[in-house]
Image (tube, rainbow, N blue to C red):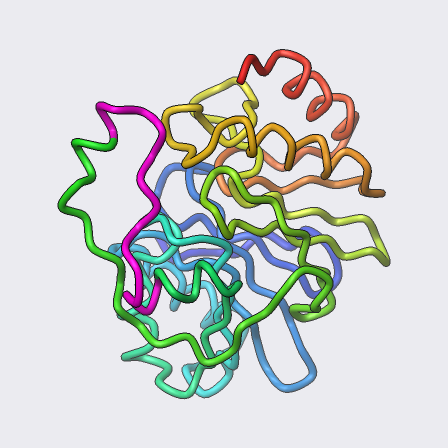
Amino acid sequence: MSQIPENLAPGVYRVDAIRLKNAINVLLLENDDGWTLVDTGLAGSVGRIKEALAALGAGPEDLKRIFITHQHDDHTGGLKGLLEWAPDAEVGATPHEADVISARRGLDPPSNAFFRRMSSGAQPPGVPVGKVLREGDLVSGFRLISTPGHTLGHVSLLRDGDGLLFTADAFGCLPRKIRVGVRKAFCADPSLAKRSADKLLNERFSTVVMAHGPVLRADARAKLQRAVERCRY
């Protein structure tokens, strides 16, 4: 079955990067000159993302930009494969994440000792980042908000015009409950992740898309607020 992207708002499509619905969400953003992809899923997600673009009438020459919210493999895994398919796409990330993605520095170790040991041999993608962006910069009409903690250079994206917020992993739902930073064990700095979650609650938004979990439309703010209130890190 081919991948049909979900239209969330004008020019914004959600793509399931794996077969499980809402398990790993990436975004396709329409621009005057083509498309921007936000995150790339896992290495096995390349085919699904290509199918989604094809369903939107786009080919490799139409993928103009790939923006990576943070370094983790479920967000960068498809990057190399997509660049082989669309070699002219410009890769963007924040300064710290760009250093990791390009392998100028190693991956941020998780705070949890078990996960630190498990991931000790993991390597960053080693892909050059052509465009370094910072808080306040725009990616296809979305404003970058610095939300470190899950990783040290993690960012979320907000389209101020219609209040569409992509938290990436500042919040996440694995498997059912919304949590700050997806899971404490995955965060490089859990207390910083909580401060970043608090920061997002000060923004004006209406619809929330997390990298992991369902799209929140009704009571989106209240649901994130409850996740922060439950958070003990």
Q: In this view, does 201 lie above or below 104?
A: above
Q: Magenta span: helix, strand or loop, mainly?
A: loop
- Horizontal placement of 216 versus 90: left or right? right
Q: Position of residue 122 (x, y in %)?
A: 19, 48
- Residue drawn where x is 73% and y is 37% of the image: 199
Q: Give the range drawn in magenta.
A: 101-115
Q: Residue furthest left?
A: 121
- Residue drawn where x is 51% and y is 38% of the image: 149
- Horizontal placement of 193 versus 74: left or right? right
Question: In the depicted view, which residue is nearer to us: 159 or 199?
Answer: 199
Q: Where is residue 25 in the image (x, y as percent from the top left)?
A: 48, 46
Q: How many marks?
A: 0
- Residue drawn where x is 62% and y is 42% of the image: 209
Q: Where is residue 229 in the image (x, y as percent from the top left)?
A: 68, 14
Question: In the depicted view, which residue is nearer to us: 161 or 9?
Answer: 161
- Horizontal placement of 60 versus 117: left or right? right
Q: Is residue 83 above or below residue 45?
A: below
Q: Does the magenta stretch include residue 106?
A: yes
Question: In the depicted view, which residue is nearer to us: 187 or 173?
Answer: 187
Q: Does the magenta stretch include residue 42?
A: no
Q: Where is residue 78 in the image (x, y as percent from the top left)?
A: 32, 61
Question: In the depicted view, which residue is nearer to us: 16 or 225?
Answer: 225
Q: Is residue 93 above or below residue 151?
A: below
